[in-house]
Amino acid sequence: MSKTETPSNAAAATAADRLSAILMADDVSDSLWAAVNSGEADELVPELAALEMEQDPIHKHKDVLSHTIAVVAKTPPDLIVRLATLFHDIGKPRTRRIDDEGVTFRHHEVVGARMASKRLTELGYDEQTVDDVTELVALSGRFKGYASGWSDAAVRRYARDAGHLLGRLNTLVRCDCTTRNQRKRLELQEHVDHLEERITALAEADRRAAERPGMDGNAVMEYLGLEPGREVGEATKYLLEIKRAEGDLPREELEKRLDAWWKAR
């Protein structure tokens, strides 16, 4: 222990190392169940005990803890993703309600994100890890409803809110499906595939829309002596094609190209 490190901080760092070792084991399902059965999980993440008591009417597991461990077991060996999946339903016991729709867990992601942040900080994880995991937990339910149809604006908002965690968020969404119904499993993967394709296409469209030719319409009109009209639009489109193919060129070169283009017309 360093002179500046308090005993409590040292213990917290050790706790983070212990949980990380459990989650990064080759067989994470076995390591998690071993931690639950030995009582180590109660010491590290006491909130998990409530999941074992909570029935899971959506995923058809006997309890939410079983579903959670099944989801973690499907993830790649990425500590951020595994921590996020471990905590993604942690808020369900606190948000459980029974109404006309049956058992609901409204806003459990928001509640769970706060719980995850508190627990991970107490365990001694670094600030970036806490922030990333907390954000993934908060966003973990955002994909619901995509199959019913999202506008382009909704797709852009999903990608923007996820930011640098987009790939990890989609991985969590893909893994958060433990149904034995093969058709439903395939449908989920197809929906995520479709979402990722739309995100890529919209990003490219936005990038192109933000592009500007080396000479704008006013510069083209002044150089060629034109009035506003169709020819100006065609000229700027031609200059934009040059930029996409060759990058930024000197003004003199663009004027030469514009002269040749105009003469060819």
Image (cartoon, rainbow, N blue to C red):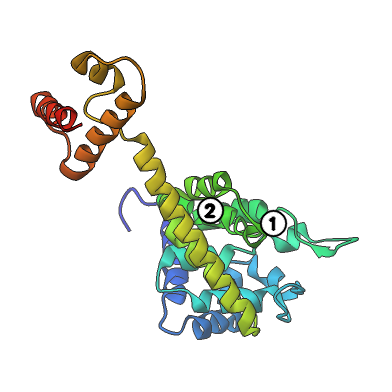
Q: Residue 253: x percent and y percent?
A: 9, 29
Residue 147, above or below 25? above
Of residues 132 and 260, which is closer to you in this image? 260
Q: Residue 87: x percent and y percent?
A: 58, 63
Tell me the quarter of the picture where residue 240 sits: top left
Question: What residue is shown at x 29% (from left), y 17% (from top)?
Answer: 218
Q: Specify the label residue 108 is tagged with.
A: 1
Q: CA distance from mark 2 to mark 1?
A: 13 Å
Question: What residue is shown at x 26% (from left), y 29% (from top)?
Answer: 235
Instruction: Answer left or right for 17 relative to 72.
Output: left
Tell me the quarter of the picture where residue 35 sits: bottom right
Residue 26, above or below 148? below
Q: Residue 220: x percent and y percent?
A: 24, 20
Q: Residue 34: x percent and y percent?
A: 54, 84
* Residue with the mark numbered 2: 134
Sequence-wise, which precedes: disc 2 or disc 1?
1
Tell me the quarter of the picture where residue 213 sits: top left
Dot 1: element: helix
Identified by mark 2, the residue type is Thr
Residue count near mark 1 (Cα–Cα under 10 Å), binned few <14, some 14–19, many ≥20: many
Of residues 181 and 74, which is closer to you in this image? 181
